[in-house]
Image: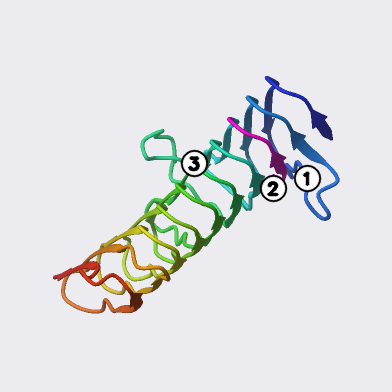
């Protein structure tokens, strides 16, 4: 499907097996325009989505889950002042989950300014279920963008964020259930802020590489609360501000 134009509303619900939607792979299909509203819901089996959007002031809400299964979601957005929400399982706090068992992975590429991306992945498996997975890769190029990532539940988390530009804000949270977690953030530019919050029993790992090439400071805040063991934190930073940059690290059992 190729949709061109402004103020377009698209609602799609796929309830049942082997869902898919498509797009990308050369990006000759997709949505182009401003002020559009896109809602896509996939409930049931093998999910999918992918897709590309070029425009400004668009609202995109993508949801997979409600008790299963394979997930995916890849979103490529070019433009300014777009709002993207990716739910896999839900929470934060759109609730649902229903003892989710998703195979997750959400890859997000944003190019532009003043964009807001919020993702939430859950895997709160019920008794005797060994759910895991998650995986979230986010790439942002531009200024004044916000990326918020939440991962909850039965281990196997992973967040990988690459951001280039100024005044960007990356906010990440990972919680439970026994081990798992891992956050890797690379951010380059001025006046950027990073928040990492990892909680739950054992393991963690946060690796941050932050560069402010022209002097204005960055702000890094890390909290790791993992009971009585594990947790590691590594920061590689180039701070050219004569007044210094702000780094706050809290590790608690």
If you read the primary sequence from the N terminus, does the residue marked by circle 1 or circle 2 appear first?
Answer: 1
Give how far apart the Cα atoms at labels 3 and 2 are.
27 Å
| Residue annotated with mark 1 | 22
Q: Is residue 222 above or below residue 232?
A: above
Name the residue at 36% across, 35% down. Answer: 93
244 to the left or right of 38:
left
Q: Nearer the viewer, residue 156 or 37?
A: 37
Q: Nearer the viewer, residue 127 or 238?
A: 238
If you read the primary sequence from the N terminus, does the residue marked by circle 3 or circle 2 appear first?
Answer: 2
| Residue annotated with mark 3 | 114
Residue 49 is one of the magenta-drawn residues: yes
Q: Is residue 143 above or below residue 204?
A: above
Q: Is residue 3 above or below residue 123?
A: above
- The magenta-colored residue range is 48-57
The crowd level at tag 1 (other Cα within 10 Å; few <14, some 14-19, many 20+) is some
Q: State the quadrant of the C terminus.
A: bottom left
The rendered magenta stretch, by its main secondary structure, is classed as loop
Name the residue at 39% across, 34% down. Answer: 95
């Amino acid at each position: 499907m190729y949709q061109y134009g402004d103020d377009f509303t698209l609602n799609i619900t796929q309830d049942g097996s082997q869902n898919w939607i498509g797009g990308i792979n050369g990006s000759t299909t997709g949505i182009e325009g401003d002020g559009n509203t896109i809602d896509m819901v996939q409930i049931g089996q093998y999910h999918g989505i992918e897709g590309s959007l070029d425009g400004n002031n668009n609202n995109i809400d993508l949801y997979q889950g409600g008790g299963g299964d394979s997930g995916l979601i890849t979103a490529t957005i070019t433009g300014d002042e777009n709002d993207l929400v990716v739910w896999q399982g839900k929470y934060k706090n759109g609730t649902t989950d229903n003892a989710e068992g998703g195979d997750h992975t959400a890859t997000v590429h944003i190019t532009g300014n003043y964009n807001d991306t919020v993702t939430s992945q859950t895997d709160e498996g019920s008794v005797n279920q060994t759910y895991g997975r998650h995986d979230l890769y986010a790439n942002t190029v531009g200024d004044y963008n916000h990326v918020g990532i939440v991962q909850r539940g039965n281990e196997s988390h992973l967040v990988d964020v690459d951001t280039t530009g100024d005044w960007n804000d990356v906010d990440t949270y990972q919680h439970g259930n026994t081990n798992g977690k891992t956050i890797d953030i690379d951010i380059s530019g001025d006046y950027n802020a990073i928040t990492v919050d990892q909680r739950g029993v054992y393991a963690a790992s946060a690796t941050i590489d932050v560069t402010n090439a022209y002097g204005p400071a960055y702000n890094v805040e890390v909290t790791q609360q993992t009971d009585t063991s594990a947790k590691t934190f590594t920061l590689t930073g180039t701070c050219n501000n004569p007044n210094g940059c702000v780094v706050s690290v809290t590790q608690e059992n």
